[in-house]
Amino acid sequence: MKRLLDVLREDLHLTGAKEGCGEGECGSCSVLMNGDLVNSCLVPILQTEGAQITTIEGLAIDERLHPIQQCFLSEGGAQCGICTPGMILATYHLLERYPQPTLLQIQEGLSGNLCRCTGYTRIFNAVQQAALAGATG
Amino acid sequence: MRSDATQYDLIAPRSLDAVLQILADSPNRYAPIAGGTELMVAFGAGRLQPKKLVSLWNLSELRFIEERPDAIIIGAGSTFTDLRRNSLIARELPLLSQAASWTGSIANQNRATLGGNIVNASPAADSPPALLAYDATLTLVSTRGTRSMPYRDFHLSYKKTALAEDELLHSITVFCNFNGYIQWIRKVGTRNAQAISKVAIAALARTRDGIIEDIRIGAASLRETPARLTATEQSLLNQAVTPATIAAARAATLTEARPIDDIRSTAKYRAAVAANLIEEFLLAL
């Protein structure tokens, strides 16, 4: 019973999703499963049969950064980078539902993604810039 | 330490009937797993006891929300996101909608199911206080047939439920007759998001000419199971909300609450907060 996270990282060598807590608290392993944000450390691989999985590697098209990635870069919304792939996928999921989110909606949308470099303000700024740039999924 | 994945076997039959047949053929052998937000945590930590698991994830027979003239029926496989996004539940069952919104994170809500929250039977779970206040009915299913029972009778003792080994929770029914009721819910946790409750209370009541005619209070983290606060309810029935009845209700809550000291809080704090929440609810009537 492999976890989706292990298949991604060890079998497919897609190392963008990180293992932080391994118990669904930190969001470092976030991926999209049929468009829904999930913690890949809590998904048995069998349950992904037939599902479309999008990792951070799948967000940039033709080696160009996705606008959300660009905004995280320009706003300094990343420090050590461990939480960043999950933050960006959570943002993608948030903007799909709320293209112009309030700060409260941003905070809730990203509340399952922990940053230990204390960078939340810049991360929230990056999400707001991405929304302004019309960076919906 | 991480579990050895090769020691675990997960199967995913494509129908509810097939799952029930497997549970009937080999009771106590397969443990059901839905969104995995509980069991996969144990798996990751190397302490998942069952070695054979059967997936319920996304079985259409368990993932539905149905409106009847007098009731709402929620399939046990409905996720918290399904509940949050459902306008019927937002309108008719605001306590459940609110509880769904503060369960885990968005990623957890996309996977965690209402049925899982109930059968996992944590005394701190988020949905039970609301379901107790609504006096929900559970429908259990097995190859032997279906049976219904009041949710308030489902939890027998700590982590022990009325579910037989070959049975699954199929659905949760709430009869909607809440016209004229005040509905109230509050969770006290370490932070707003992704916290496990220190204490949570959901309650509803109907008053007439200032007298409480009907009242139901569901609580998390106050007893060894999610539980109705029946002594508190009894102290308030046919009473007006006055300083004296508030004091009596607070005393009743302290009498029937059996909170524990653990990593998240202390028994003393939980009891004090529970009494304060009861008072806050009564002042809202």
Image: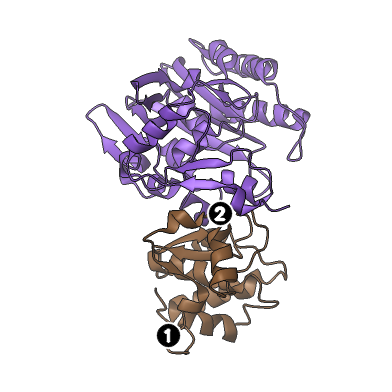
Chain colours: A brown, B purple
Whole-Å distance between the Cαs marked 2 and 1?
27 Å
Q: Residue furthest left?
A: B69
The reply, left or right, for residue A56 in relation to residue B158 is left
Q: Which residue is mark 1?
A: A61
Observer able to see residue B39: yes
* Residue at image point 39% right, 68% down: A96
**Image quadrant where residue A122 sits:** bottom right
Q: Position of residue B268 (x, y in %)?
A: 77, 28
Q: Is residue B98 left or right of residue A87?
A: left
Q: Nearer the viewer, residue B35 or A71?
A: B35
Relative to B276, residue A64 above or below: below
What chain does mark 2 sit on?
A: A
Mark 2: amino acid? Leu
Instruction: Provide the chain ID for the residue under circle 1.
Output: A
Q: Secondary structure at mark 1?
A: loop
Residue B277 placement (x, y as % from top left): 61, 30
Question: In x, y percent, where is residue B99?
Answer: 50, 40
Instruction: Identify the mark at residue B234; answer none if there is no mark.
Output: none
Residue B102 in view: no
Q: Crowdedness of circle 2 by 10 Å Cα count: few (<14), some, many (20+)? A: many
The residue carrying mark 2 is: A42
The three-letter code of the residue at mark 1 reads: Ile
User: Mark 1, residues whose alpha carbon is within 10 Å: few (<14), some, or many (≥20)?
Assistant: few
**Mark earlier in primary sequence (2, 1):** 2
Residue drawn at 69 percent across, 53 percent down: B2
- Picture quadrant where residue B138 is located: top left
Relative to B175, residue A39 above or below: below
Q: Is residue A130 above or below residue A98?
A: below
